[in-house]
Amino acid sequence: GLAVDVAVRDVTLVVSRRRSAWIAQAGRVVEKFLTTLSSKVSSKSTPPSPCKPLSVQQPSFFTTAPNVSVSVSCDVLGLLVAQDTVNEGEEGEANTGDSLLEGAAFGAHGGCTFDAAKRTLQIVAETRVVLDALDHEKGAWECVVEPWRLRVTADCGFSFKDGSASKIYTKVEGVNALEITLGEASAATVAAAARALSGAETAFPGTSARNARTYWLHNATHVAVTYTLPFADGATDVGGTVSPGERVAIHFPGTE
């Protein structure tokens, strides 16, 4: 048999719309390369002569494959969702800007076992995850998902007839209770992260998640206040009314 053990200390992945586009583009390049390579290999292979049919039966993969056991562990696996910013005077070059969401998986460990004789594949993984959102008004991180331990198990059986996957069973269970706290600021940050990754425009014309900042307009008076936001690019003015003691989110295009 074959046994492999992999141990990793700390790994952090920074994700933004620009980085996601790079990853997708790299994936398309690799896929195109593999497709081209496969077509070239297929064109070079010559089919057997029809007068001399092959009578030798190729051995099954499961009769020659060894049993494999793989164990993987990682102390900290971090994920940081950032917002892209465009610096003026640099021909639209984007840099990684403010942080929005920060997630982490602590003490992640798992194992994979392949039994060729029984034609089964078993995967077990367990970790503890957390998710924080940055409150830009307070300048502090707020916990959205409290530390939650979960376990993932997957079993796959292969047919003895043709080797295809005949049964796949997956189970995800939480070891402890899942606690989610979503306040006004954290909800706005989660929405901003979704816009930053998708590139969708905000509710205000002429603005986008890449070049617009969110500010709070708080009405501390005892009367309703009406506001108007004119845009220099000729778009329709945006405005509204804020009730006494309430606040609304407003966006100014091109501000940092």
Image: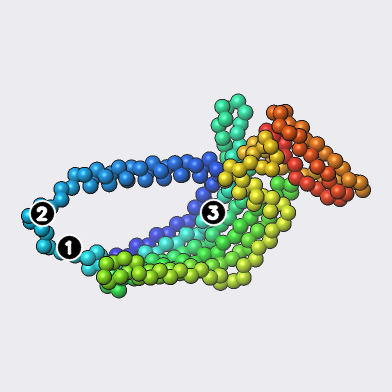
The C terminus is located in which quarter?
top right
Q: Which mark is residue 78?
A: 3
The N terminus is located in which quarter?
bottom left
Q: Which mark is residue 128?
A: none
Q: Residue at x 63, y 41 (%)?
A: 201
Mark 3 vs 2: CB contact within 8 A:
no
Q: Position of residue 157 (x, y in %)?
A: 35, 70
Q: Residue at x 23, y 47 (%)?
A: 42
C-alpha span from label 1 to label 3: 46 Å
Q: Kindly give the residue lying farthest to the right in the view shown.
A: 222
Q: Viewer-nearest of labels 2 and 1?
A: 2
**Local SS, label 3:** strand
Q: Kindly give the residue lying farthest to the left in the view shown.
A: 51
238 shown above or below 186 = above
| Residue wearing tag 2 | 50
At label 1, the amino acid type is Gln
**Local SS, label 1:** loop
At label 3, the amino acid type is Gly
| Residue wearing tag 1 | 58
